[in-house]
Amino acid sequence: MYQYSDKDKQIVRNRTKEFLSQVKRRIDGNLTEEEFKPLRLMNGLYLQLHAYMLRVAIPYGELSHIQLNKLAEISEKYDKGYGHFTTRQNIQFNWPKLEDVPKILNELAGVEMHAIQTSGNCIRNISCDHLAGINNEEVEDPRPWCEIIRKWSTFHPEFSYLPRKFKIAVIASETDRAAMKVHDIGLKLVKKRNQIGFEVYVGGGQGRSPFIAKKINNFVKKRDLLNYLEAILSIYNEMGRRDNIYKARIKILINELGAEKLKSLIESKFKKFADKKLLLEEDEIKKIKNYFKLPINDPIKSSIPVKKNKEYNIWLNQNVIKHKLAGYSIIMVSLKHYNQPPGDATAEQMKTLSIIAKQYSYGEIRVTHEQNLVLPHIKNSDLFSVWNKLRALKLATPNIGLITDTICCPGMDYCALATARSIPISQKISQHFKDQSIQDKIGNIKIKISGCINACGHHHVGNIGILGLDRNGEESYQISLGGSADEKTSIGKIVGPSFSEKELIKAIQTIIKTFERNKKNNEDFLSVFNRVGIDPFKKDLYDKSNP
Amino acid sequence: MAKKLKGDSFFLSANDLKTGSVVYYNGDDWSEKVYKAKKINRSEIEEHEHIAKKFEDECIIISPIFVELNDDGTIKKLRDIIRKNGTTF
Amino acid sequence: MTKVILNKNKVLKNEYFFVDDLTNLTKSNSGNLIVTLSQWLDNKKTLSKKKNIGIQLNSDESLSLIEEEISFFEMIQFNFLTFKDGRPFSEAKKLRIEFQYIGEVRASGHILPDQYIFLLRCGFNSVEIESKQKKFWLECLKMGMGLYYQP
Ligand code: HEM
Ligand code: SF4
């Protein structure tokens, strides 16, 4: 795992001090709210319905057991004893006091964490594949690249007051586990003619107008990466729209200019400062890569304990993945227990998980964009013990990838922008489908729920997307079908008029029935949808003459 | 702030600057106790906008809003009910 | 409100002055003339004969409008309409890298002390601020010196 250099430490400490001074100036009246807001946002501090909310960065979704334990402590000391893991691999605390935030940041700094650039119109936390470094498929580990980009983008003098927020994701496999194509920039490490470099995708995004990123370069050399990113950001900073916040993202710029035009502007900018300051030298890259060496090097002989326990076997089947080194496994820790808001973890869960990680997973934990956690390096022979411990914490729900593994934003229960609630919807879905045999029969399916058009819950790219709306004071839910956030990214199609909160579960049931009726062999939901299209679903949902 | 407001009576609410807690205007200052909240008529909105602004400028509150009330004095909108009662799950 | 110029950590008096009416320039004005973009565009011919001229661009006015004449100006001032408008950061960098501009680049208008280091690092040399704020600006400068990742 990455470890802070002295400079990193100093930078984070300094920022904490700076924020303390900003909070003081705000409380004393030397900063207006208008001036303070962008400053607090750059430190991850929002105002929600009932309280402030602090979003803490988990760079590329990687945590040490010490850090996880600290998050648990913070949630107990300054919050209400839980935290919420987000789709951008961060964690949010829902109830901190403004006066306490500098103290929280100080505690975070002590474990090499911060809330820098988790919000605001700047380059946000870099997303990454949660299986980086431990799967067999990738051309190389993308995490060092996330760290290189993190450094470059932190307090970037030119890009801290962009037209709008800017999100970057890095992957290194054909399989996309990071929703790369709905980021402002998606980078994919590829191997071409025996050289490794980056495919560059620009202009993806969700929000009120979803777009899939367009590939603008087939191969950017490693050494040129930062100069290339700098060129993209310079063009965006200059040309991105500032007159209308809904049109300010780079997705709009690329669609207004056309991909070719934007590409040529970027390329000519790039030429002007290629070979200049940001060129990455081989030994620099190597230095960063060294931090990301796996804690384990060689395959071992270790087999999975065989037990007659049905629950354990279901879990093994659903939540455990092969590690790239034989003898080890990866455990997906579900944060989707049936009564828990998706992505929430209690202080107790975090604390105990931190101990488990220390004891069994070389101290490492990861966060997925689907709001679950990962124990990345578990010896096969430990699986049964770890399962027992996770189960006691309600962290072994065997539903990874199934219908109750929903992505869900905080919605109107917390969020000041919400038009409807989302957490109770996900809980209803969980309750309704919690029977394991029903879930297994339905198979892989992704339900994603947002409480408003901003799409933090990724509804556009859900196989079933649910968007909460306000219809004359009543909560109402629009359903879209066929979205996907993987390597075949697609935006879901709206199926028709929205449903009341009461009708919604029935509608989901109907959709599942339609799917099952059309399903051939082992097809999953998305394959069926792509084969039969939206009409059979529409018909079953809205055609009243249909039995 | 008063744009698009419907109904005839309201509470004036906000978040406490230092703690973020939901607070209501009770005629002199702000408190978390909703039962102390002052009922404001439509005709008094403008006056209370100024009051809110004054407390904002004094760094007491942020994000003031008018909470719409039903005829029986209960809070009308789900969002405002959640602000008062907390999360619903 | 009295304003001063900060040049890195030096506090200076502003030696540039604006006039509303360019035809009314008298010898009694001491210092250098700075013109707005529209004054420049309307009076290019006469102004190009003068020396030590500065120009002010608002943060929403593009540098490309004076691209041909950049080296003519002694000073280019970006006036931030709001501190959230980050375009001048890119424009300043462009002046230095793409146009190899060596004159003074100054920031004025709605800017925050928290932005001082960013401004300097993008190629600005000076800022125009309220005199009473200068202490805080200098503190911000001291606090953040050297603490950044980019070259
Ligand atoms: C509760 C406070 C939150 C606020 C005020 C908020 C605000 C927003 C806004 C305004 C957008 C739309 C941006 C645009 O279209 O330009 C957005 C998008 C997004 N947010 Fe949030 N959000 C919040 C919480 C979350 C949470 C909890 C998550 C993760 C679960 C999240 C992840 C995202 C993602 C992934 C997007 C879409 C990506 C994109 O911007 O293209 N946000 N958010
Ligand atoms: S989607 Fe809307 S309701 Fe949900 S967190 Fe984002 S802004 Fe809030």
Image (cartoon, coloured by chain):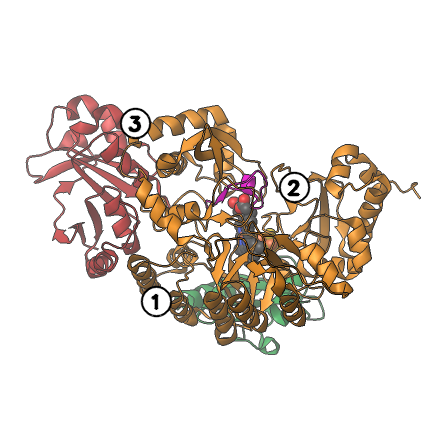
On screen, residue C148 versus residue A253, left or right, reads left
**Residue C133 position by quadrant:** bottom left
**Residue B83 position by quadrant:** bottom right
Q: Residue at x 77, y 33 (%)?
A: A531
Give the distance between the C-alpha atoms of the residues marked 2 and 1, in whole angstroms: 42 Å
What label sits on residue C28 in the rendered view? none
Give the image location of residue A415, x and y in percent: 58, 59
Classify the position of the C terminus of chain C by image quarter. top left
Residue occupied by mark 3: C65
Depth check: A112 or C139 in front?
Answer: A112
Chain A pictured colour: orange
On screen, residue A11 versus residue C47, left or right, reads right
Residue stretch rendered in magenta on the structure: A165-183
Q: Which chain can be seen in green? A: B
Q: Which chain can be seen in red? A: C
Residue occupied by mark 2: A484
Q: Evaluate whether residue A153 shows in this view.
A: yes
Same chain check for tags 2 and 3: no
Is the C-beta of the residue carrying label 1 under 8 Å from the nearest atom of ligand 1?
Answer: no
SS label for mark 3:
helix
Q: Report the amino acid beneath label 1.
A: Leu
Residue occupied by mark 1: A20
**In magenta segment, residue A385:** no
On screen, residue A402 versus residue A279, left or right, reads right
> Residue lying furthest top in this view?
C45
